[in-house]
Amino acid sequence: MNKLVIIIFALLISDKSLSQAKISIDHLIEFKNSFSNKNEEEFLKNFPRNFSDFKSTFGWNDKKDIPEPLYTEANNYIDYWFSIIEKDKYTSYESQIVSISKNGYWEADAVNYFKEKSINYIKTSKKYYLINELLDQEAQSVLSFLFEHSQKDSLFISYLNPEKQSILRNILSKNISSKNKRSTIATYENNLDYFIKTFDVNNDNIPDKIVCSKPYQGEDLFIFLGNKKGSYILALETTNFSEDGGNVIRDILPLNNNLGLEVKTYFPDRGFYEKEYYLIFRNNSWVLQNIIYKTMSGVSEHAVKYICDIYQNIDITKYGWMEKINPIPEESERNKKCRIESVNTFEFFIEDPDGFTNLRKEKNASSEILQKIKSGENIEVLDNTGDWFLVKTQQGNRGYVHKSRIKSK
């Protein structure tokens, strides 16, 4: 039976009047057509504006225990909506993230998908004002929807104003059982999502505990200071700078001649891009003293490595500190502001869980295989444009390898 006929039938036998059903059918037809025809303005006009309408369009009908009209297609519609509101001329529709989240409650499928997309959109677009400008009562409702059943997100919290931080921390604390409060070191011992480093952070000759989310497991960084009684007190709760998985945590190290620690990260999907964050314990506070950015000028044989030590001096316990970070200098300025090192002939190598990867004749996975390159084998990258890099193997063969299989030393 045609889907539209089923929808009409379901509406006609519902508790609604015939006129109400007709309006709902017309709206649904218009909505579906705007999606099929990629009519952005019509699509935005018809997209649900509150949680009730969202659930009755994309969710599950709890009373009848049946899917709503667009249940099976929900993710495609949601993806399309988020792709549109990214455009400058449609940013006014971003406020619907708030209006849909308000008075919402967690459910699987489309509701959860919208929740996760909303968090990611706010983070990647840095649209935290959508939360910060809300009245506290509204923020409580919106943040409850977005973060109930979720893990703590240090990066998200760091961009909120103090009032909204307090609201979100309170919500997140309820997500953790009373036996596993995040303020205790026991929460993270034997926890597979975290690793723990032990060294003296504040130079009092007593070992401290540094807790960090493992790669791709989150962005948490906690510092627990030890005392003579053998217990640990939470002194800092912040981010490990992993940037939602794109910038991956590599290690946490002590500083030899200062109070604090070094956070090392890298980008696994780029030729060479590393960062070293230096956190200093000063005057009973925590300061991001400097960041060392490491990158390359290109992938040719004449490429050089830039080591850019950029002063920060930012108190990371204050609201909005992330926005104050000084970035790596523009390419045109790096020769003046960064140290330059020569690059060895082989900076890149193959890393593949299968033990080898294929050198392809063209930029696609079905192209002719020219050679099998073993994991760990050095290669020369000739062109890093797009998803397939042009490389030269040690045997002198030239071809293409997907960038996900190429790592840098």
Image (cartoon, grey):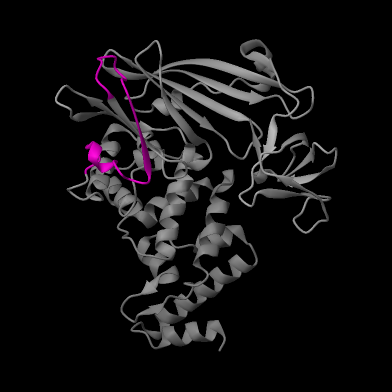
Q: Residue at x 63, y 68 (%)?
A: 36
User: Which picture quadrant has residue 217?
Assistant: top left
Answer above or below: position of 150 versus 129.
below
Q: Position of residue 276 (x, y in %)?
A: 50, 23
Q: Residue at x 72, y 23 (%)?
A: 344
Q: Is residue 192 magenta?
A: yes
Q: Main secondary structure of the magenta part?
A: loop
Instruction: Tell me the quadrant of the picture where the C terminus can be found.
Output: top right
Using the rendered image of the protein, determine whether residue 206 is visible from the camera's viewpoint.
Answer: yes
Query: Which residue is nearer to you in this view: 84 or 240?
Result: 240
Q: Which residues are magenta?
A: 181-207
Q: Residue at x 51, y 63 (%)?
A: 75
Answer above or below: position of 271 versus 20.
above
| Left or right of 325 on screen, residue 17 | left
Q: Position of residue 62 (x, y in %)?
A: 32, 75
Q: Position of residue 43 (x, y in %)?
A: 55, 62
Tally of numbered tags: 0
